[in-house]
Image: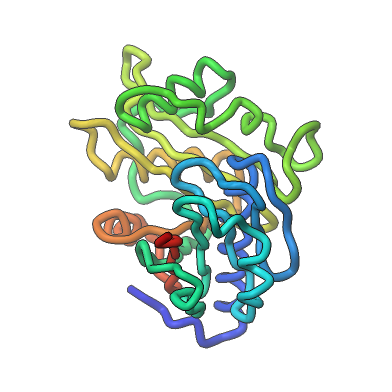
């Protein structure tokens, strides 16, 4: 089900989801800063991550683009409310997706794998290898394991971070997700399952472990296509569109 954000409560939820995602991008990127309207990085961010994430519908386009390196190849902007027109500045839409929300509640089924939180650099490397399907590139740096609010070295606004892993009896990571808390919501991202492992297992396990780590908090994130359909099956609701723009130069 897709809900058009036409109430103040839904608008507040969209802003919370956008901020949560921006905080995750800031933590992974280890760069950038927040204003009332956006998070942005003056330098190119890691692969798969945008150079800016808008936090409001009325983000000033000129100020937003001035805060990133639009001359760098593949500079990108996450338009959290799908309202910007960046085409005149040389950008084109890379993809669209839906923000999703799930009220705090237990998942409807028990996971088949053994789920736990990643606890050290070696485990994080194994998690990323499973997520990538081939090898660890260091995209998810060990500093993310210390990404709790107020901890030494935690990036501004990053909140709390956990990498979630589902293992078989032999200890192999066959499914996983990343989670980050900001305020009263927990963001779910990078949900994956290895070949032969049902996608539903990744969501069931991630929801179960997240509920244990942050009881009583709602979940947010964004998905598209088949991944969106899977999230909706697990109790999420689509609450509004977003777009990612990439510089075509």
Number of residue marks: 0
- Vertical relation: 76 (above or below) 113: below
Observer able to see residue 150 = yes
Determine the residue positioned at 49% across, 58% down: 76
Where's the C terminus, which quadrant?
A: bottom left
Q: At x 28% / y 45%, what residue is drawn?
A: 200
**Which residue is more in the foreground, 153 or 77?**
77
| Left or right: 227 as drawn, with respect to 3 | left
* Residue plotted at (50% across, 55% down): 75
- For the rendered model, the colour scheme is rainbow
Q: Position of residue 81 (x, y in %)?
A: 51, 74
- Residue at image coords 63%, 81%: 58
- Identify the residue at the far bottom of this view: 6
Left or right relative to 159: residue 137: left
Q: Tell me the quarter of the picture where residue 225 sits.
A: bottom left
Q: Residue furthest top?
A: 170
Image quadrant holding the N terminus, namely bottom left
Residue 62 sits above or below residue 32 on the image = below
> Which of 216 and 173 lies nearest the eye of the viewer?
173
Occupied quadrant, residue 171:
top left
The image position of residue 172, as x and y in percent, is: 34, 18
Would you say 113 lies left or right of 77 here? left
Question: Residue 89 location, x and y as percent?
Answer: 50, 72
Q: Is residue 181 visible?
A: no
**Front-lying residue, 189 or 109:** 189
Q: Position of residue 180 (x, y in %)?
A: 59, 45
Residue reaching furthest to the left: 196
């Amino acid at each position: 089900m897709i809900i058009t954000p036409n109430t103040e409560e839904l608008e507040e939820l969209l802003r919370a989801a956008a901020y949560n995602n921006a905080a995750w991008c800031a933590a992974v990127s280890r760069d950038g800063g927040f204003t009332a309207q956006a998070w942005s990085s003056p330098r190119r961010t890691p692969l798969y991550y945008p150079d800016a994430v808008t936090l409001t519908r009325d983000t000033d386009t000129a100020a937003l683009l001035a805060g990133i390196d639009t001359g760098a190849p593949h500079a990108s902007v996450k338009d959290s409310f799908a309202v910007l027109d960046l085409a005149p500045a040389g950008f084109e839409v890379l993809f669209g997706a839906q923000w999703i929300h799930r009220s705090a509640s237990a998942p409807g089924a028990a996971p088949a794998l053994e789920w736990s939180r990643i606890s050290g650099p070696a485990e994080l490397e194994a998690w990323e290898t499973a997520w990538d399907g081939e090898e660890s590139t260091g995209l998810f740096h060990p500093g993310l394991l210390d990404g709790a609010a107020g901890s030494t070295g935690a990036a501004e606004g990053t909140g709390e971070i956990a990498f979630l892993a589902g293992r078989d009896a032999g200890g192999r990571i066959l499914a996983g997700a990343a989670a980050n808390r900001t305020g009263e919501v927990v963001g779910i991202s990078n949900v994956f399952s290895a070949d032969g492992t049902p996608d539903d297992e990744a969501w069931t396990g991630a929801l179960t472990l997240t509920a244990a780590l942050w009881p009583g908090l709602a979940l947010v994130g964004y998905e598209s296509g088949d991944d969106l359909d899977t999230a909706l099956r697990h109790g999420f609701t689509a609450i509004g569109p977003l777009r990612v723009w990439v510089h075509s130069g």
